[in-house]
Image (cartoon, rainbow, N blue to C red):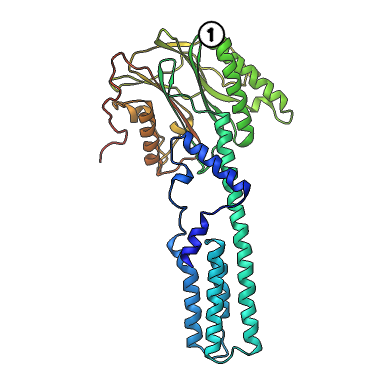
């Protein structure tokens, strides 16, 4: 019974389920992970659930042995396939039902009541419940496949709206991470984009007000507008103005909503191809940080505070890009407020500048790995908001491929 149930868990039929496997394999290969076909079997039911139908049948046998003939154990034998249905495959559910039926027949034969009308009724009850359990098992399987398909589609939609930047862009080393607050959620309102342009490498990290599909639509609008404006606008200030206009148009299109309620905090940056500096325009977003090769951390506060994107109806003034030194070997860290507003059990906010100060990492990917791990330790494994991170390193001439790394998490 157990083995049959486990084997059937990994089996899927039909064109739809085959499409889910293909999509999942495509996502896995893109991430450099083994595809579903390359991993060993699907997960087994947990041990308690695996033994529960067996326990139910065993209790029925004991109950029948310890009680007078007028008492019947058929409810236990009928319950066993219903218990198995959500956790086992179709064959496992059938085997469980047949086992219960066999026990009912043997026990009735042993006490000489097999020919009685009530015994026939009990046997028919076990058969009927087994058939119903198999139907429930099939419904559960189909629902699981639809859920898996929806999950894969959501992840692919997120990749289409918010594609992962390349590891090398314009001579810079790039790493990006999107951590959703809700497990298995892929789509949210945080965004990042990096693009090599005639004016240098330009990037944006932002946080759209709101959640759900409205936020996703705004992310798509902003990323598309940024891609176009980053190529065409001569200055970073011009890019910010184009994004403002794009959000204004989007707010007008959504007639049911007040455009002043739709805004996005964002920081835009530009690293000229000549290097040496980074230009920043901050629109109400958490300040990025610069980590020097020595491990010293600088918070890049804006010289002029400005309203978030999409709030030009409330007030506006000319953007002025701040220019800061960007020495070789340094790393820029951009993030959304899901990082700086992550709290521990006592309500203390996570302080990325303090946690990173004095730490050295071999590259931006390792930095993000350490930061995400540290946030999980700080919050106890959960966060109430999505978190987008973007790390951009400017390699020094002759810098070794890997450098000494010190963990963000302080030693115990």
Determine if residue 319 is in view: no
Rendering quarter of residue 300 = top left
Left or right, 197 with respect to 301, comes to right
Residue 55 position (above or below residue 304): below
Give the x, y percent position of residue 128: 65, 73
Residue 313 position (above or below residue 65): above
Which residue is pictured at 47% across the width and 87% down the height?
A: 66
Rendering quarter of residue 405 = top left
Which residue is pictured at 27% across the width and 25% down the height?
A: 403
Which residue is pictured at 42% across the width and 40% down the height?
A: 347
Determine if residue 95 is in view: yes
Assign a secondary structure to mark 1: loop
Which residue is pictured at 58% across the width and 74% down the height?
A: 78
Quadrant containing the C terminus is top left
Give the x, y percent position of residue 178: 48, 33
Tell which of 5 and 71 is nearer to you.
5
Give the x, y percent position of residue 265: 54, 24
Q: How many marks?
A: 1
Residue 293 position (above or below residue 208): above
Local crowd size for mark 1, using a 10 Å CA cut-off: few (<14), some (14–19), many (≥20): some
Residue where numbered disc 1 is placed: 235
Rendering quarter of residue 251 = top right
Give the x, y percent position of residue 83: 54, 67
Tell which of 229 and 196 is nearer to you.
196
Tell which of 251 and 239 is nearer to you.
239
């Amino acid at each position: 019974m157990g083995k049959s149930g486990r084997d059937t868990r990994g089996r899927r039929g039909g064109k739809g389920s085959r499409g889910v496997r293909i999509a999942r394999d495509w996502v896995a290969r893109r991430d450099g992970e083994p595809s579903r076909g390359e991993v060993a079997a699907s997960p087994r039911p947990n041990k308690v659930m695996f033994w529960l139908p067996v326990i139910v049948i065993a209790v029925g046998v004991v109950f029948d042995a310890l009680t007078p003939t007028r008492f019947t154990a058929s409810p236990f034998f009928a319950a066993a396939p219903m218990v198995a249905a959500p956790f086992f495959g179709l064959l496992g559910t059938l085997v469980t039902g047949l086992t219960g039926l066999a026990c009912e027949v043997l026990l009735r034969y042993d006490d000489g009541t097999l020919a009685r009308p009530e015994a026939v009724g009990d046997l028919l009850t076990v058969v009927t419940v087994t058939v119903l359990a198999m139907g429930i098992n099939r419904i559960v399987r189909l629902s699981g496949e639809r859920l898996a398909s929806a999950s894969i589609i959501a992840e692919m939609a997120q990749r289409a709206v918010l594609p992962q930047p390349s590891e090398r862009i314009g001579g810079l080393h790039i790493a990006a991470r999107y951590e959703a607050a809700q497990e298995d959620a892929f789509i949210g309102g945080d965004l990042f984009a990096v693009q090599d342009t005639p004016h240098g490498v330009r990037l944006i990290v932002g946080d759209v007000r709101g959640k759900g599909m409205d936020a996703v639509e705004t992310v798509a609008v902003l990323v598309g507008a940024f891609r176009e404006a980053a190529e065409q606008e001569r200055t970073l200030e011009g890019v910010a103005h184009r994004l403002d206009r794009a959000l204004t148009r989007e707010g007008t299109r959504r007639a049911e909503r007040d455009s002043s309620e739709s805004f996005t905090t964002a920081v835009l940056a530009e690293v000229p191809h000549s290097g040496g500096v980074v230009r920043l325009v901050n629109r109400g977003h958490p300040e990025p940080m610069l980590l020097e090769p020595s491990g010293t951390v600088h918070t890049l506060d804006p010289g002029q505070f400005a309203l978030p994107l999409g709030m030009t109806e409330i007030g506006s003034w000319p953007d002025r890009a701040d220019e800061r030194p960007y020495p070789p070997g340094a790393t820029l860290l951009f993030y959304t407020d899901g990082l700086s507003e992550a709290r521990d059990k006592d309500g203390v906010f996570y302080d990325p500048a303090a946690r990173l100060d004095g730490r050295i990492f071999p590259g931006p990917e390792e930095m993000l790995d350490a930061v995400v791990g540290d946030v999980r330790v700080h919050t106890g494994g959960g966060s109430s908001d999505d978190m987008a991170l973007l790390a951009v390193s400017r390699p020094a001439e002759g810098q070794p491929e890997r450098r000494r790394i010190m963990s963000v998490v302080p030693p115990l």
